[in-house]
Amino acid sequence: MTLYALSRLAQAMSEAGDHEDARNVRERLAEAWARLGGPDSRDAIDALTDLAIASAVLGDLASAIKTQERALEAMDRVLGRDDLQTREARAVLLGLQALSLALERGPDSPEALDAQERLADALAETLDHDVARDAMARVASARERLLGPDSPEALDALHRLALFMIEAGDRKAATGALARVADAWTRIKGPDSPEALEAKARLAEIL
């Protein structure tokens, strides 16, 4: 059976719910492509990405993360850090890491929220602005709920969310968010504080 036929078999196994066997086939494919074309060949890199996803489907996030790290390292070498496909691979890795931390330490843990924010940044780099905004919205909501709406962390997250909203084309929501940030910093530190002035400047740019 050719490697391309094996890949189709793995896909069929996944669609049939036979995820364990599908991962086993993906492991064989990753090894075979690395041996035949070299670890930096496109087929080998794609096989690693497919294997990472297969591991994630089984809930084996540790293996998924390690495998995706290998894929990302190869993409960095072959395509460069700024290539869109490399940025997408980085977003996948950060998504796996965020999920792992959320499951291990709780979705509202500082580590999980920091990982979610890194994921939002990575998604924005892939130009998937709607999904990036939604990821940052979860961070902002959690920090406001956990630390209070006037905490520096919550206000910083809300300010960043407004920037994601602008990129996503949601200028009305961004205007409301920036107005809240500006009002809060004016009340807390005064109208001439750097935080208040920055929020007001951003607000003026989109009005």
Image (spheres, helix red, strand yellow):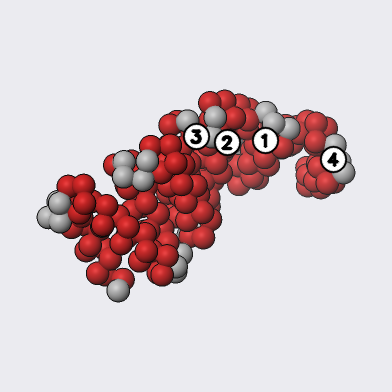
Which element carries disc 2, helix, strand or loop?
helix
Mark 1 or mark 2, which is nearer to you?
A: 2
**Crowd band around label 4 with a 10 angstrom C-alpha radius: few (<14), some (14–19), many (20+):** few
Which element carries disc 1, helix, strand or loop?
helix
Q: Position of residue 199 (x, y in %)?
A: 25, 58
Of the image marks 1 and 2, the number of the one nearer the N terminus:
1
Mark-to-mark CA distance, 4 and 3: 31 Å
Amino acid type, mark 2? Leu
Amino acid type, mark 4? Gly
Is 67 located above or below residue 139 in the figure? Answer: above
Mark 3 or mark 1, which is nearer to you?
A: 3
Of the image marks 4 and 2, the number of the one nearer the N terminus:
4
Q: Position of residue 154 (x, y in %)?
A: 36, 44
Of the image marks 3 and 1, the number of the one nearer the N terminus:
1
The answer to which image quadrant residue 111 occupies is: top left
Residue at horizontal 80 percent and vertical 36 percent from the top: 19
Cβ atoms at labels 1 and 2 below 8 Å apart: yes
Q: Which residue is mark 4?
A: 17
Amino acid type, mark 1? Ala
Split into 4 quadrants, where in the image is the N terminus? top right
Residue 76 seen anywhere in this rendered image of the structure? no
Q: Which residue is mark 3?
A: 108
Q: Position of residue 206 (x, y in %)?
A: 31, 71
Amino acid type, mark 3? Asp
Any mark on residue 99, and which?
A: 2
Q: Which residue is mark 1?
A: 56
